[in-house]
């Protein structure tokens, strides 16, 4: 059983995927959890020094994502981009043995380093295109679990609504399941997982 922190998650989707496999998992966000379960509502840095085995972090991408590059000059001028990058790096430098940081294509590729992997929902059973970058520490890249057709950018074409930002940021269920199955097994037994025995 691994102790897993899901940082900056309110949906509970990744947390619940780990819980279903018998891990000790807790989500953490400034927002309340959408689904009842172990959740700390507050700053991730309040709980980051617990002896976690694995952290999967979804830091806010508002001031980092290249999709908003037209606003970068203003965000650098008032410090919003620097604050976003600093938050990202505090997570990356946490003293947790295994770390995955998830973000869309963003400035961290040039400010820090390129991601270890870029995945798409269609590799994990969802007919969507939404490039998701993963920066990994002591974790293997995710292996695709269910490559499907019907690759559309539906997430990016959602109509305006009060909760559009929340829906666009949620982790796809197939990706959450792959993280729990593959990384949970790796943290428990790295050699067995790498050999495909998990």
Image (cartoon, rainbow, N blue to C red):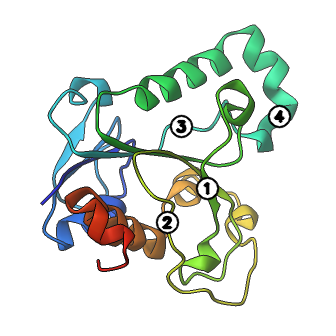
The residue indicated by pointer 1 is 117
The residue indicated by pointer 2 is 142
User: Disc 4 versus disc 3: distance between alpha carbons?
Assistant: 15 Å
Q: Are marks 1 and 2 in contact (CB under 8 Å)?
A: yes
Estimate the x, y position of residue 171 in percent, counting from the top left.
48, 62
Dot 1 alpha-carbon crowd within 10 angstroms: few under 14, some 14 to 19, many 20 or more: some
The residue indicated by pointer 3 is 60
User: Disc 1 versus disc 2: distance between alpha carbons?
Assistant: 8 Å
Q: Residue at position x 51%, y 60% from top?
A: 141
The residue indicated by pointer 4 is 69
**Which quadrant holds residue 5?**
top left
Foreground pick, 53 / 152:
53
* SS at badge 1: strand
Estimate the x, y position of residue 103 in percent, counting from the top left.
58, 46
Q: Which mark is first along the chain, 3 or 1?
A: 3
Q: Is 104 on the left or on the right of 29, as rendered?
A: right
Q: Is 63 on the left or on the right of 157, as rendered?
A: left
């Amino acid at each position: 059983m691994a102790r897993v922190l899901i940082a900056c998650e309110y949906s509970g989707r990744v947390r619940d995927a780990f819980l279903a496999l018998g891990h000790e998992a807790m989500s953490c966000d400034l927002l309340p959890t959408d689904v009842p379960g172990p959740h700390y509502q507050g700053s991730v840095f309040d709980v980051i020094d617990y002896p976690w085995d694995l952290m999967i972090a979804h830091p806010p991408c508002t001031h980092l994502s290249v999709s908003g590059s037209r606003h970068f000059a203003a965000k650098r001028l008032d410090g919003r981009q620097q604050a976003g990058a600093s938050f990202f790096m505090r997570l990356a430098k946490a003293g947790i043995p295994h770390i995955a940081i998830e973000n869309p294509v963003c400035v961290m590729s040039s400010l820090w380093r390129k991601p270890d992997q870029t995945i798409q929902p269609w590799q994990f059973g969802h007919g969507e295109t939404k490039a998701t970058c993963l920066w990994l520490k002591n974790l293997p890249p995710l292996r695709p679990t269910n490559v499907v057709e019907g690759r559309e950018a539906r997430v990016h074409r959602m109509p305006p609504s009060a909760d559009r930002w929340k829906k666009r940021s949620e982790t796809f269920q197939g990706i959450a399941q792959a993280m729990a199955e593959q990384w949970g097994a790796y943290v428990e037994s790295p050699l067995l997982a790498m050999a495909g025995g998990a």
